[in-house]
Amino acid sequence: MVIGDRYELDDFPLGQGGMGAVYRGHDKHLDRKVAVKILHLPVPDEELERRFIREARILARLEHPGAPTLYDFGAHERRLYQVMQFIAGVTVADLVSEYGPLPVPWAAAIAAQLNVPHEVVDLRPHIRPEDRVSYELTCDLYDEEESPQLADRFRQLYLKGRERYSVRCREPMPYVRVCQLCRRLVVPAYHREATRHGVRVWFLGTNEWVGLSQNPDNGRYVFSGIRRLQPPGADEPVWVVHLPFLLGARLGDTMKVLERVGWQPPDGEHVVESSANSCLLGRAAEDKATRLLGFHPDSMRLAREVTCGFLSRVEAERALSTPHPSSMSVREVVTAAGILS
């Protein structure tokens, strides 16, 4: 196929996503390789066309070694296209497909090439003494042999943990849902790192900390997409803004964005998973906690996602029923992380 009377394209695209496809091409006028991105829309969409044009204008103004040079822009058979510098190589998606999640040094090297500000933050200095004791108590809890008595204790501690996971609660205790314990570490860490960088607002692309609370006056439940983080001793708050919730986004909207950037879930995984999929500590605790509680420890979190309309019940149930075998115990994970010796 020849477009613009000068760009001869290969028969098959190098890659494609939700908005279009990228082809290797040859500029017959200047005798050079080019990459041609063509907007493919099943039905006319003025908003996506405006976005494609805006993208081209931004790319035309960029002068950066990590960004290709835009050579040309036009329309072929009513389809918009961009002609840009052809850069041979592999994509980050190719690397992840072959090697799995990238080690931190690899990801940092890629970010450095793109001139993306990044920093590896050691969270261990943010652990408060009482929370270190809670890690020890949690390891002791998961070390115990299973019994009806332990099952009763797990259920009691699960309820107690839901009441006392706030960073304002200073009494050490064992946590059945281990992500509540880690949250006690992450909240002050978020606040201190944000303060160190002069940041007052964090924008998240997930609904991780969307609040669900009950109004004591009328008994109604209220969602909040903006959370205020102000650990004890902090002079000023830091605000966490959940964009998907505030924009009324659903999982399908997230999938469209992921498709546009060419992202696919790793083999054997789904877009929606329990925390045990991405957290070694959650993975180590998942099987025992589920057996002793009689339900998955992430059930309430995913139920909240269903209630706010982000997920369907089917998607949440599939995530909760997916097992994540672990070769490490809770204590082994916490020790390997350097939290306990």
Image (cartoon, grey):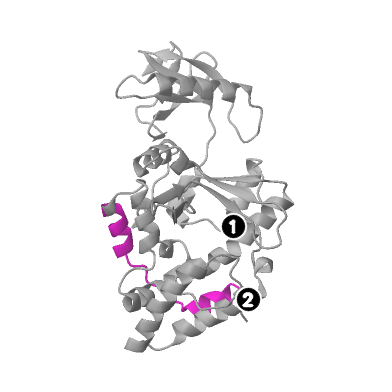
Residue 126 % position (x, y): 67, 66
The residues tagged by marks 1 and 2 sit, at their Cα atoms, a distance apart of 29 Å
Q: Residues within 10 Å of mark 2 (few under 14, many from 20)?
A: few
Q: Which residues are the magenta region?
A: 314-338
Q: Amino acid at mark 2?
A: Glu
Q: Residues within 10 Å of mark 1 (few under 14, many from 20)?
A: few
Residue 125 % position (x, y): 69, 67
* Image height of 233 relative to 91, above or below: below
Inspect the magenta stretch and tell me whether residue 71 lies in it.
no
Q: Which residue is mark 1?
A: 104
Residue 130: image tag: 2
Q: Secondary structure at mark 2?
A: helix
**Residue 267 in the figure: left or right of residue 242:** left
Q: Amino acid at mark 1?
A: Val
Quadrant housing the C terminus: bottom right
Looking at marks 1 and 2 on the same chain, the residue that comes earlier in the sequence is marked by 1
